Amino acid sequence: MPGILDRFRLGGKVAIVTGASRGIGRSIAVGLAEAGADVVAASRTLTDVQAVAEEIAQLGRRSLALKVDVSQQPDVEGLLQHTLEAFHRVDILVNNAGISPYYKSMHKMTKEEWDLIVSVNLTGVFLGCNIIGNEMIKQQQGKIINISSVGGEVALPRLSAYSACKGGIDQLTRTLAIEWARYHVLVNAVLPAFIETDMTTGLRVNDVLREEIISKTPLGRFGRPEEIIGAVVFLASPAADFITGTCLNVDGGWMAQ
C-alpha cells in the first residue's frame, strides 16, 4: 500500500485545465504539474497560455497550450481531440474558465450581458463535462473538478448572473456525481470566496467594497490564487478516490457563518 504522501501525487496522469492563462487557472495548471501531471492548458488567449505551458515544461512535465472558447462546442470537441492525439487519454478535467464582466443590479442588465455570462460560466462547464466526461466514461475512470464559488451558495448583490451560474455548477456537480459513479468518474467542485485575481480588481480598488468583503471574511483578507491549488490537487489525486459530489469551500471561513 502506498504511503499517504504518495496518494497525493499525480505522476502519469493527464489533466486539462480551462481558463489556464492567469489567476486561479494558471495556479491550478502549474500546481497539477508540480504534483506530477502532464497538463493541457486551455484559454481564449493563446499567447498567455503558451507561457503557462512553457513554465510547466520547465518542471519536467509534458504540456500543451490550446486556444479554446469553452462556450463553443467545436472548440471543446477540439480540446478533447488534441488532448487524445498528444496524450492518448484524459484523467483530470478542471473546468475553471469563467468571467464576471459586469457588477450591476439585475434590472440594469441586458439579455445580451446575461447570455454572455451564462454561455461561459455555465454552458462552458456543461460542454466540458458532456464532451470530455463522455471520454472518461469510455475509459471507465476520471476526475472532474468544477471551479465554482461561494456565490453559488449565498446571495451576492449585483452579481446575479454570476451567482446563478455558480449555483447551477454546484447542482450539476452533485447530479453528475450520482449519475457517473457507476463509471468511476468522480465529480466535485471547489468553491473559492474572493480571490486576488484580475476578475476582482474592481472590487479591491473600491475602498467600500473591499472593506465590506474583508469584514465578512473571518480570516480578514482576500484569498490568493495559489491557495486554491491544494484543494484541486487533493480532489484530483488517489487520496480522494472515495469522494464525489462534494462542494469544497476554500473561502477563509465565509460559509461557516
Image (tube, helix red, strand yellow):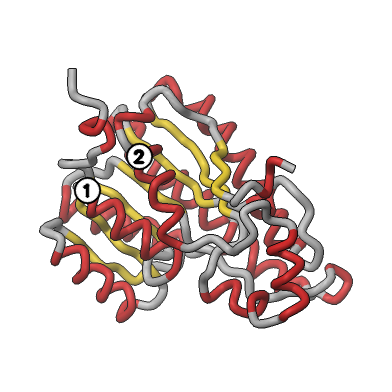
Residue 222 spot, x, y in % from top left:
58, 64
Viewer-side residue, 56 vs 106:
56
Residue 12 vs residue 221: left or right? left
Mark 1, residue position? 37
Q: Residue furthest right?
A: 107
Q: In the rendered view, tell whether residue 65 sits above or below residue 229.
A: below
Kindly identify the residue that appears in the image at 59 percent across and 40 percent down. Answer: 172
- Tag 2 near tag 1, CB within 8 Å: yes
Residue 95 spot, x, y in % from top left:
45, 53
Q: In the rendered view, tell whether residue 163 sits above or below residue 172.
A: below
Which class describes the residues within 10 Å of circle 2: few (<14), some (14-19), or many (20+)? many
Q: Residue furthest left?
A: 60
Q: In the rendered view, tell whether residue 170 sits above or below residue 114.
A: above
Residue 98 spot, x, y in % from top left:
54, 64
Mark 2, residue position? 236
Find residue 64 and report its image quarter. bottom left
Q: Secondary structure at mark 2?
A: helix
Residue 6 vs residue 100: left or right? left
Going by the numbered disc 2, the residue's amino acid type is Ala
In the picture, which quadrant includes the N terminus?
top left
Viewer-side residue, 201 vs 246:
201
